Image (cartoon, rainbow, N blue to C red):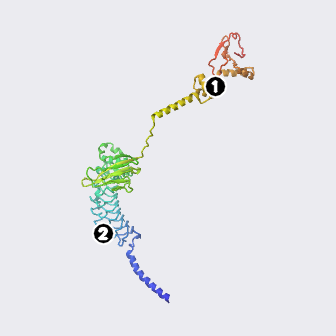
Amino acid sequence: MAWLVLGTLLCVLHLGLGTDGAGHFESQNCPSECIFSADLVSCAGRGLPEVPAGIPATTADLDLSHNLIRRLRPGWLTPLSRLHTLRLGHNHLAVLGQGVFANASGLRLLDLSSNALRRLGHHDLDGLGALETLFLFNNSLAHLHEHAFHGLAALGRLYLGCNQLRDFSFHHLHGLGLTHLRLLDLSSNLLERLPVSDLAALPAFVKNGLYLHSNPLACDCHLYHLLQRWQHRGLSAVNSFVRDYTCRVFKVPASGVRFLEQGRVFENCSAASSRDLEGPEEQLQVQVGQSLRLHCHTGTPALHTAWVSPQQELLVAPGSLDGSIVVLANGSLLIRSVQTWHGGVFVCMATGSHLYRSQIHEYNVSVSYPHPEPEAFSTSFTTLLGCAVGLVLLLLYLFAPPCPGCRRCYRRTGRCCCYCCGRRHRPRTPSPLQELSAQSSVLSTTPPDMLSRKASVHKHVVFLEPGRRGINGRVQLAVAEDFDLYNPVGLRFTVGSESASSTGSEAPVVT
């Protein structure tokens, strides 16, 4: 019985707590149309005609894309103070209105792409002071207010491609600040004329991310030379879409040509007229380990000075994050020990009340390793050493020939020892006397050992061929005692009187 009473009390208590708990849970739960995970809420693709109510205040990432939302209520973001990412792409938004983004000071990414927006007013984007990335591509934007982006001081990436813009103010960029801007996409619009002087005045880091391709540009010599220069400088916005930069030769949409690939359209243009549009970068050479100081020359006092490093890092006082670059109080930039990663384009931007507009200076820094200095040497010592080596080589050449017997050969013949040694090892060709001796050994009846004994006492046996006979007698060879068969220079021919009367004798003649 006690267990039954205890079980009944626990059941009643559970039912009471469950009712209160369930009501409390429903008040904190996200809308039924959305998916909740930690601080991320996704209501994408639900066919919602408006923003659902009851979104948790802890939401940091809200996805409302691919719905049917047509308008946003002013102040609807007030409870979401932690929100930093808002996706509203692929809806039916036609206008924004003032106060729509109030209390969104922490928002860093806003996606309004693929909507039906036709214009941006002066206060449509108020309250987005921390915004870094804004997607507005694939809308129907045809007009931008002169100060549409005035409050977006931290904006670094602005996507305006695939709209219907016919003009864009590159002079003040509709209120955009240049300090953080790294990408400006204006591709696939209706831009026909571009202010070349304003484009040339932009800093290098903005030019590198300025996308102007797929616009119906009119063929202009100044614009051609400017974009060609950007291409040669390796700016990615141009090099990545070379084939998509076209201009119309005639006032017909189908007359567009790829002018960066086919420069024949601008053969009659003079490059001299566009050289002064874009000032050359100041080239600096520095070696690793050296110090480098860069000055931001403005001519008049500047209130604010900022630098951009080759790694796209914004440099303000006191300097870079790693401490290798220091920004001084006068706006100059100091690198105490230059390293290889410091090479590239440094951009200085100065602003002030006395300056008509922001002044920009660019420095192209090339970093190399120091060349080792040649070791000092004594000229007299080197000369003395060369003389000693030459004398040793001469003595070796005269008294230590490379093969034995060359000295005797040199003294007897007066020829170089190399010549004599070469003769010793060169295969010998039989001389005419050797051929005669070989024939006589075949026809003679003297045994071979007798010939060897005769040769041992320097007696040479020669059989005369019939071709050697004279008209009235036989030609007789007079051979010296020390006659060398391999050098028959001293051979003398004589005619013996005693042999004049003998004809047809084939006996060997020994002299």
> In the picture, which quadrant includes the C terminus?
top right
Which image quadrant is residue 474 in? top right
The spot of residue 252 in percent (x, y) is 31, 50
The spot of residue 231 in percent (x, y) is 37, 48
Against 316, residue 224 (above or below) is above
Amino acid on which disc 1 is placed? Thr
Res 211 seen here: no
The spot of residue 194 in percent (x, y) is 30, 51
The spot of residue 11 in percent (x, y) is 45, 84
Residue 429, numbered label: 1
Against 371, residue 110 (above or below) is below
User: Callout 2: helix, strand or loop?
Assistant: loop
Which image quadrant is residue 68 in? bottom left
Badge 2 density bin: few <14, some 14–19, many ≥20, Cα 10 Å: some
Q: Residue at x 27, y 59 (%)?
A: 147
Badge 1 density bin: few <14, some 14–19, many ≥20, Cα 10 Å: few
Against 409, residue 314 (above or below) is below
Q: CA distance from mark 1 to mark 2?
A: 116 Å
Number of on-image labels: 2
* Of 404 and 486, the residue lying toward us: 404
| Residue 135 located left or right of residue 509 | left
Which image quadrant is residue 84 in? bottom left
Q: Are marks 1 and 2 in contact (CB under 8 Å)?
A: no
Q: Which residue is mark 2?
A: 75
